[in-house]
Amino acid sequence: MSITFGGLATGLDTNAIISELMTIERQPITRLETDKSFFSSRLQAFKDLDGLLGSLQTKAEAIDTAAEIDSPGLKQSSDLYYSASATDTAGLGSYQIEVMSLAQVQKDVSGGYADKTTSTFGTGNMTLTVGGTPTSITIDATNNSLEGIAKAINDAATGVTATVINDGTSSPYRLVLSGDAVDKTFTLDTSGLSGGTDTNPAMTTTQAAQQAHIQVDNIDIYSNSNTIADAIPGVTLDLLKADATVATTLSVSVDQDATKSKIQDFVNAYNAIVNQISSQKDADWGNDAGFRTVKRGLQSLLTTSISGLSGSYSSLAELGFETQKDGTISLNSTTLSKAMDTDYKGMVAVFAGETGIDGISKKFADLLTGMTDTTDGLLASKQKSTDDTISRIDDRIGRLEARMEIREKTLRSQFAAMESLVSAMNNQSSFLSQQMTNLANMNK
């Protein structure tokens, strides 16, 4: 860019004048930039709304079936023998449970040896049979130590893990074999090893493999794991201790506080949408039809009565939902508790529906699925229209910027021409003044 010095002849600050003139010339661009900012800010408001709609959809889907809205509470007569956890699908009721035995893998141990690294055993092949399948393992001069044998067994990857322990005696090192699962019984035959200076390891079973065994209401249940998930629907038992002489009671009942919490989560998500829409009322886009459509749709569902239900209730208002002046809702805990105590299934049916009848949660979820659809939803529509509008604005700004550049060059040329003309006139004026002075001097 060339450097220009304005006003050398006229004394005018031509750079400042041109800058002010260009500010006036650029007013259409400024208005377009303002429009662009408006559409971008409006789109962000709808992005925020879309996130809140998605959150409400999640909360509605979390209570649109009886299994989901139910929140089972567990009570054990003893915590010594197992710990219990439940999902929303847990079968409500009382269960008698006896832990007959815990699941355990087979463990074998060898006699003790003075050293674990010295090559003192025979060489050849030993046979590890796991679950009836034999595997031949080669022992040679490179691995005929206690640690070498353990590594060879582990490298064979048969489902048996070998370790070497130190029991603290005078011959402390022992080979220990552990099955990886209760159904993997095994034997190790070292008779194929010969020529060593030490007795080849002979294994003794210290723990036999066995399944976990419990009785639930006098029904025998077996498992290869101490975690049993199928004995009671929706309940997982983690076995801790066996005692066939002790029967404990596990009660699975409705946790009303947890159920209320799920419903309150729905209320909070609904109110977040109402508050977000209200917060936009002072913005230029506050009256956008999209906001009104969302609010009307949600309010209409909120007051919907579900007909055909077999229970005592058909609307959210009967369960303690109360509309406030600002459009938000509050949940009357006392009313909801009374409904739960009076007709719990009827309360659940309002949210979850019954066979052939959609509950209010399903209706909300379906409405919100449409609103948040990534192709035809509210945000998708606003995104497309906004992108198109901003693209047109950018095109207009680009064309105007090109005109502004030409206009500024023209102004600078015009002011430069003016400065040249004034400079020439000043020079001529100075010349004439000098001539007049000379004439005056001659007359004297």
Image: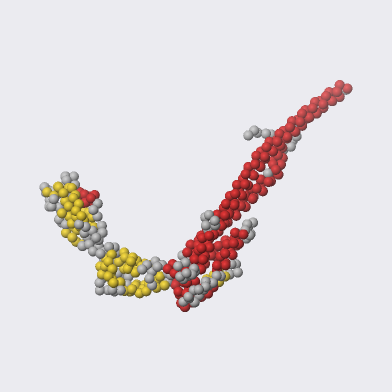
At x 63%, y 47%, the residue is 393
| 196, above or below 300, in the image | above
Color style of the picture: secondary structure
> How many discs appear?
0
The reply to whether residue 79 is visible in this rendering is yes
User: Given the current orientation, which residue lies at the most extreme bottom position?
Assistant: 342
Q: Where is residue 368 in the image (x, y as percent from the top left)?
A: 52, 61
> Quadrant of the image for the C terminus?
top right
Residue 303 horizontal/vertical position (percent)? 56, 70
Residue at 70% x, 36% y is 410
Identify the image quadrant of the N terminus: top right
Q: Is residue 203 above or below residue 69?
A: above
Q: Is residue 259 above or below residue 150?
A: below
Give the image location of residue 76, x and y in percent.
Answer: 34, 72
From the viewer's side, name the closer residue of 286 and 366.
366
Residue 159 coordinates in the image, percent (x, y): 24, 55
Residue 8's place in the image compared with 204, above or below, is above
In this view, the residue farthest toward the front is 356
184 vs 198, left or right, is right
Question: In the orientation shown, which residue stands out farthest toward the right?
Answer: 443
Image quarter of residue 283: bottom right
Q: Is residue 146 left or right of residue 13?
A: left
Q: Name the residue nearer the viewer: 110 or 14.
A: 110
Residue at x 59%, y 67% (from the top left corner): 327
Quick one: 224 or 132, which is closer to the camera?
132
The answer to whether residue 262 shows anywhere in this view is no
Residue beneath the point at 14% across and 47% down: 123
Relative to residue 187, is residue 360 drawn left or right?
A: right
